[in-house]
Amino acid sequence: MIENERRIRDSLSNQGLLTTLDARMELLDSGHVTLSMPITPAASQQHGFVHAGATFALGDSASGYAAMTMMGPEAEVMTVEMKINLIAPADGIRLWAYGEVVKPGRRLIITRCTVEVERADGTRRDVALLQGTMIPV
Amino acid sequence: MIENERRIRDSLSNQGLLTTLDARMELLDSGHVTLSMPITPAASQQHGFVHAGATFALGDSASGYAAMTMMGPEAEVMTVEMKINLIAPADGIRLWAYGEVVKPGRRLIITRCTVEVERADGTRRDVALLQGTMIPV
Amino acid sequence: MIENERRIRDSLSNQGLLTTLDARMELLDSGHVTLSMPITPAASQQHGFVHAGATFALGDSASGYAAMTMMGPEAEVMTVEMKINLIAPADGIRLWAYGEVVKPGRRLIITRCTVEVERADGTRRDVALLQGTMIPV
Amino acid sequence: MIENERRIRDSLSNQGLLTTLDARMELLDSGHVTLSMPITPAASQQHGFVHAGATFALGDSASGYAAMTMMGPEAEVMTVEMKINLIAPADGIRLWAYGEVVKPGRRLIITRCTVEVERADGTRRDVALLQGTMIPV
């Protein structure tokens, strides 16, 4: 049972950018959050692949929500820093971001996230890896 | 004179995400590109500040276009990796991203970018610093 | 069978800094390399913990050798960029770095590494996480 | 006048790794610290260039000391995370690291650092760029 589950789910629907991207909560567990979003022209770059900024937004958000699952009901988090390695073009129909806490802490929380693309035939591959730091606010 | 200026400007208008964010080219010079975008609910997180993903998207794009200015007319670039430090909440009316090439190379191009927020009273402050690697494709 | 195993092992003994740090090859397999080094005053900072620079050197080297295992017998690699999150002070007797290739590529190789500290009582804990990019040279 | 100048200089001479590398304080000013070290076999990799770990150690240390200059006399800092882009091989006689605070804060301090190599003929070039986060302890 995640104490602040309601707060996290409300946060998702109140995030303008995530609403713009039509992001959806797929899994919410202690230290783990999975988000997904459809791949549409609105999130793409000039070749029809997902723009690095959209991949980052989904991965960063999954990381931040994963951090929030390990905090009290009133807490929120902000990203201190985040590094993304883009390892393959995201060409497909849906993007999945698997955020996880790798080191919880009182002052800082370290997260990692893998972003996958899902193709029309159901196959998937990794497109990005993120590693970053969240701070409670 | 930037050889591929037309190509870069077309790229900006063909990027779905940047169109979604209403990003605008403010300056395009050899090794330097400035982009700006309005701060609207569509780019925000739950507190009304710009979402880290939108800040990243603008900064990453300014960095990529700065890299493109130093390449031949047919070249395009992709982000290999990018690191962002978020140093202050972006509360204001407009976001400005100053991308620059710090190390051009045939195989890899290293970029830095500072993102500033502009407030209604015209004052500005830094909100994010990016450092990353682009690859010609 | 790693084609360039001999080359990798020779490289380790020819690296002045790794010799200075007394680093040892613990495991060498396809896409995976484990290095260890003793925690001595020569690798420490003022509180007796391992200096971030030594932690980085071991983790970066394990990552680079992991990348080399996936290349031809003549190939070498250089670090393009590397990010380290330091998650706990390294107080103990020995440092272990587990480097792995997460995305092999012809042009770029993406690696991750976890660094653990071993205490006198045999317990271990994670002290650092690295994520970076290698390039064949 | 840097309040904790004595403390910073003592710290440098008490850092085992920096002593091993023979690092020297070249400049210490508010928000700015320059360190240098000779390029010797003990800090090198197999081609005689400086090992990325030694470049990182010098750059990370210059960054940390720059952060310390902006804090009270009793404060120390630890590296939370640091990203390094290696932009050219460090072949020369001496390495110079210019650390600076780009965003001081009560909870976190953001730093950047440029590392240069000095050749026998007196010319210099950039070899690495670092961007990271320090935390007071």
Image (cartoon, coloured by chain):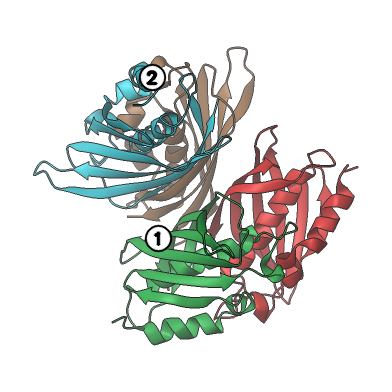
Chain colours: A brown, B cyan, C red, D green
Question: Is residue D91 toward the left or the right of residue B115 in the image?
Answer: right
Most extreme residue toward the left is B121
Q: Is residue B28 left or right of residue B124?
A: right
Residue at 51% x, 20% y: name it: A94
The residue located at (15%, 43%) in the rendering is B119
- Residue D67, given in percent of the width and then of the height, sits at 38, 69
Disc 2, SS:
helix
Is residue D51 positioned above or below B35 on the image? below
Q: Which residue is mark 2?
A: B11
Tell me which corner region of the image, top left, top right, bottom left or bottom right, holds residue B44: top left
| Left or right: where C39 falls relative to A98 | right
Q: Which residue is mark 1?
A: D111
Q: Residues within 10 Å of mark 2 (few under 14, many from 20)?
A: some
Tag 2 subunit: B
Q: Are marks 2 and 1 in contact (CB under 8 Å)?
A: no
The quarter of the image holding the N terminus of chain C is top right
Distance Cα–Cα, label 2 vs label 1 = 33 Å
Disc 1 secondary structure class: strand
Q: Identify the disc placed on residue C64.
A: none
Relative depth, front residue between D109 and A124: D109
Identify whether C112 is placed above or below B93: below
Q: Which residue is located at x 74 percent, y 66 percent?
A: C16
The answer to which of D19 and A90 lies nearer the viewer is: D19
Q: Is residue B87 visible?
A: yes
Label 1 neighbourhood size at 10 Å, few (<14), some (14-19), many (20+)?
many
| Quadrant of the snapshot with the C terminus of chain C | top right
Q: Amino acid at mark 2?
A: Ser
Residue C73 percent location from the top left of the image: 85, 41
